[in-house]
Image (spheres, helix red, strand yellow):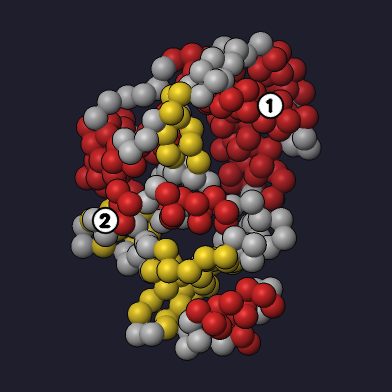
Amino acid sequence: MIADLNQLSSRQSQLLSQWLPDAEVVKDHSWGLVGTTVLELRARGGSYIAKAGDDRDVHLAREIAAHRQWLGPWTSIGRAPSLVHADEEAKLLVTTFQPGELVQGTEYEHSADTYRQAGELLARFHAQLAVTDGGEFETRQKDETLAWLSAPHRIAPDRVARLTEVVDGWPAPPSVTVPTHGDWGPRNWVVHDDRVSIIDFGRADRRPAATDFARLTARQFRTAPALEEAFLAGYGNDPREPAAWLRLKIREAVGTAAWAYKVGDEEFEQQGHRMIAEVIRDL
């Protein structure tokens, strides 16, 4: 098995050999843009997913914590993978394989029923816990946005100046934070027997509920309002308070453009520049 898993560190390979000694690699699902290896395995007569982070990884600990603390509302109804093994220090986890076809790029991405189900699932996830912070989320959002604006990127200088001026003046009010997925959208939804399920929890954290609306709003909802209507019908309300939502859209736009430049994803970077143009029109 180890010969088939040469993307992993020696410690990760050793652990995986202990956990699933008969494992065989079925498919490599890694993105290639970041240092996370995602492998579909066959072992013990079942299917599993192994995720391994490299030395720079900051996501595996979040994913493990999400599995241990928050995924019950989904795993209890078979709509998310279940944790099988995990080692935070080694940056390795194994989950059950969640069957289904990835929604992104398929006909399901344009189906209102997909978004209604996704809204219902997200509402279940958000409803399990709510904590009011002391302004930490807004402070962190401000600091992160300013850091991205100061990092290497291809955002036009006049836009950097305008956005920096705006972000410098942001307040830091308390926020109601809930468990959030952090990358909520069709690339992390799968459909099996017409049921939507959820994968990939490497960005899970406690944040305002509206943060899980951001990526859908920037992409699918822009050109298909019926999908937004279906999503809101499933979710049950709209948590996007105007002032906080504008701050979030700015953070998302700047972070998208700068992060995509950093990892060399030009298509995603162009989306970030479009998002920046749109938020500047809202100022």
Q: Residue at x 24, y 30 (%)?
A: 236
Q: Secondary structure at mark 2?
A: loop
Residue at point 32% right, 64% down? Answer: 100
Of the pair 110 and 92, the residue shown nearer to us: 92
Q: How many marks?
A: 2
Label 2 – label 1 distance at C-alpha: 37 Å
Corner quadrant of residue 150: top right
* Residue 106 position in % (x across, y down): 35, 56
In the image shown, does 9 or 272 lie closer to the viewer? 9
In the rendered image, the quadrant that contains the C terminus is top right
* Residue 150 falls left or right of residue 85: right
Q: Quadrant of the N terminus?
A: bottom right
Q: Residues within 10 Å of mark 1 (few under 14, many from 20)?
A: some
Please tell me which residue lies in front, 93 or 113. Answer: 93
Task: Mark yes or no: residue 100 visible.
Answer: yes
Residue drawn at x 25%, y 45% is 117
Dot placed on the residue nearer the N-terminal end, 2 or 1: 2
Tag 1: residue type?
Asp
Report the disc number at residue 161.
Answer: none
Q: Is residue 9 above or below residue 70?
A: below
Residue 28, percent across and down? 52, 72
Residue under the point 33% across and 38% down: 128
Query: Looking at the rendered structure, which numbered label has been put on residue 143?
Result: 1
Q: Is residue 223 visible?
A: no
Q: In the rendered view, tell whether residue 7 sits above or below residue 253.
A: below
Q: Amino acid at mark 2?
A: Ser
Judging depth in this view, the residue of 186 and 128 nearest the camera is 128
Quadrant position of residue 230: top left
Residue identified by numbered label 2: 76
